[in-house]
Image (cartoon, rainbow, N blue to C red):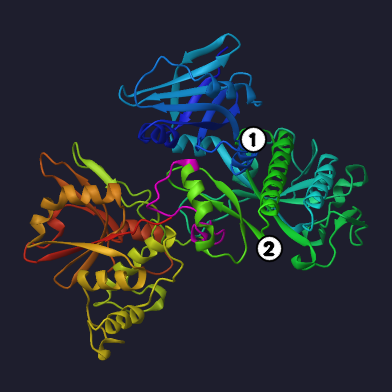
């Protein structure tokens, strides 16, 4: 029986947008007779160490996502069969029927095939939209507050210590606890969890997803891993809390406060003395309907992947004679990929020293080199999400008839009057628009600088000689041109300035704005008269000239304790408006920030 083949929308788009000839490996989730393809790894010309490279590249995906096939993109259709390429299908272990995706560019064909003993058979595929994906699956983040220590003086010592810890894991030394709950999972045993409970039940009723403060995506649900010496010694009602977890893999002690024996940590040793402390932080993905009693295997698979990721990273570092330094697990979520990527970076390292690593990742995922996706400023920050992040999400809108719509790319923070308890009513609208634009560059990873205050913006203009010293601390208005000066000085970002003589003429910029949001995607500041606004989207019918603008209004003021986002979306913070919104008597300047190509 054919497995059902499903592609996520981003995978479908990436295959159709790939230019030139490519081959690579596909990664996906296998469940209920379905292969859901969620990731694409593009081949490089260098095939040296392909096995280790494949293992490393698979382990940067969440556990539950496996290598399940190959893809090829060809400019023209050919009858030649690349048997060497197709022979890689036999190396796939997760399924007996791996998948081959083939795209022919000049014929606009994308087809799926399933491998059987007697050869490849073509089959249909469907596309899963983001909404259905989030309704079907949940991400889980597995962490421990402790670290694993390994010797780094010899390569054999690294392998020995990691192998020792792997043996402890395979003997049942891990217990998993859902954050904010009393639910524990150990082997196939459950504590305080009814046997018919599925993952969705727990996550929707007993715990909450971790918030991500620099991304609009929903964060993973958090599970803490606790390490025990042996499952035979565990009294299930006395599982140690992570507060007492001690995790050096070499020493064992009795836990004084509870009945379970634990793996104990020694005092942290300096890495210069040959020890390296490894943080446990890894992701996995599972169906919402998966029974919790069947969750143990995938949680363990996540730990094994973490071990493999660590082993390959340290082995590579050792072979390249790189000094052992503290490391960090970094999680990323590049929007073009729409999936998590987990990487190991040295701590206290500069972005400049990781240029080659980032370049390799851009090649692996066929990402443009014009935008950073794997800088340290792109690392997901787990913490309280700003309520002002991407406030247009969920806004109702009917749309222009037969219009073409394009919106801001990525994330921004909405800035407006009285924010941060600073009263700038009547004069600060352009400053707030600038702060919104600056936040976009920060959240996309172009800079780690903080969003500047009004005084810092004024000081920048004084430094450039555009304003006198008395301008600092004043309530004087600024416009699009001044904003472009500050973007150049503070971020090294150039801008395109567009202008029209009246609001009615803004329709003549429809095609340019549509192109800007499709290709660049930065928020656009528009100033006219004594008012400034921020345009973050456009809906334009080129034939009829009908046009609508998605606008952030910096003049918005929040009221009392009412729901902040609801106020923003219903009381004039963000809205769609047509040409009538703009004054017919004012001249307008628009500032279109142009990020420099950078990764």
Disc 2 packing (10 Å; few <14; some 14–19; many ≥20): some
The front one of 563 and 544 is 544
Magenta-highlighted residues: 364-384
In the rendered image, residue 210 lying in the magenta stretch gets the answer no
Disc 1 packing (10 Å; few <14; some 14–19; many ≥20): few
* Tags 2 and 1 touching, CB below 8 Å: no
Q: Residue at x 36, y 35 (%)?
A: 17
Determine whether, in the image, residue 118 is placed left or right of residue 493: right
The quarter of the displayed image where residue 475 is located = bottom left
The front one of 73 and 466 is 73
**Which residue corresponds to mark 1?**
51
- Total marks in image: 2
Q: Position of residue 186 (x, y in %)?
A: 80, 42
Q: Position of residue 418 (x, y in %)?
A: 35, 74
In the rendered image, residue 369 lying in the magenta stretch gets the answer yes
Residue furthest toward the bottom?
Answer: 470
Q: Residue at x 32, y 24 (%)?
A: 108
Checking the image for residue 325, the label placed there is: 2
Residue furthest toward the top?
Answer: 118
Determine whether, in the image, residue 269 is placed left or right of residue 287: right
């Amino acid at each position: 029986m054919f497995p059902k083949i499903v592609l996520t929308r981003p995978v479908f788009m990436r295959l159709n947008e790939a230019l030139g000839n490519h081959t690579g490996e596909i990664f996906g989730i296998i469940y209920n007779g379905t292969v859901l393809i969620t990731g694409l790894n593009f081949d490089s010309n260098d095939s040296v160490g392909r096995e280790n490279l494949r293992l490393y590249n698979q382990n940067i995906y969440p556990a539950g996502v496996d290598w399940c096939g190959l893809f090829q993109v060809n400019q023209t259709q050919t009858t030649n069969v690349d048997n060497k390429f197709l022979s890689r299908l036999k190396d796939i272990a997760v399924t007996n029927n791996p998948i081959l995706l083939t795209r022919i560019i000049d014929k606009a064909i994308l087809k799926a095939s399933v491998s059987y003993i007697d050869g490849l058979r073509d089959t249909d595929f469907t596309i899963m939209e983001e909404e259905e994906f989030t309704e079907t699956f949940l991400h889980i983040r597995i962490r421990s507050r402790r670290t694993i220590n390994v010797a780094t003086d010899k390569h054999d010592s690294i392998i020995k210590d990691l192998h020792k810890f792997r043996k402890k894991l395979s003997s049942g030394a891990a217990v998993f606890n859902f954050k904010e709950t009393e639910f524990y999972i150990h082997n196939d045993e459950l504590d305080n969890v009814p046997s018919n409970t599925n993952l969705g039940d727990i996550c929707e009723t007993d715990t909450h997803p971790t918030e991500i403060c620099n991304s609009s995506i929903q964060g993973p649900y958090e599970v803490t891993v606790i390490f025990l010496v042996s499952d035979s010694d565990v009294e299930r009602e006395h599982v140690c809390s992570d507060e007492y977890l001690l995790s050096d893999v070499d020493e064992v002690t009795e836990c004084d406060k509870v009945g379970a024996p634990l793996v104990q940590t020694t005092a942290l040793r300096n890495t210069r003395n040959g020890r390296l402390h490894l943080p446990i932080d890894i992701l996995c993905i599972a169906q919402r309907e998966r029974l919790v009693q069947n969750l143990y295997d995938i949680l363990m698979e996540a730990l094994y992947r973490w071990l493999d990721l660590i082993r390959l990273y340290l082995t590579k570092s050792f072979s390249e004679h790189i000094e052992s330094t503290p490391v960090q697990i970094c999680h990323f979520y590049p929007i073009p990929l729409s999936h998590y990527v987990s990487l190991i970076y040295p701590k206290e390292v500069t972005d400049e020293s990781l240029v080659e690593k980032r370049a390799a990742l851009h090649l692996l995922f066929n990402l443009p080199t014009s935008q950073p996706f794997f800088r340290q400023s792109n690392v997901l920050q787990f913490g309280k999400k700003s309520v002002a992040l991407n406030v247009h999400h969920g806004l109702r809108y009917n749309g222009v008839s037969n219009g073409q719509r394009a919106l801001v790319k990525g994330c921004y923070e909405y800035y407006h009057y009285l924010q941060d308890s600073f009263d700038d009513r009547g004069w600060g609208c352009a400053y707030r628009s600038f702060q919104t634009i600056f936040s976009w560059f920060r959240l996309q990873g172009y800079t780690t600088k903080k969003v500047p205050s009004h005084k810092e913006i004024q000081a920048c203009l004084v430094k450039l000689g555009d304003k006198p010293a008395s301008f600092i601390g004043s309530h004087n208005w600024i416009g699009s041109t001044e904003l472009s000066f500050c973007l150049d000085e503070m971020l090294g970002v150039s801008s395109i300035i567009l202008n029209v003589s009246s609001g009615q003429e803004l329709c003549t910029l429809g095609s340019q704005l549509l192109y800007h949001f499709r290709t660049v995607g930065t928020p656009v500041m528009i100033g006219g008269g004594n008012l400034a606004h921020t345009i973050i989207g456009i809906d334009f019918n080129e034939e009829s000239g009908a046009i609508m603008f998605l606008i952030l209004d910096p003049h918005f003021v929040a009221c009392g304790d009412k729901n902040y986002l609801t106020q923003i979306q219903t009381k004039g913070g963000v809205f769609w408006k047509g040409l009538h919104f703009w004054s017919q008597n004012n001249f307008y300047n628009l500032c279109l920030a142009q990020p420099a190509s950078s990764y």
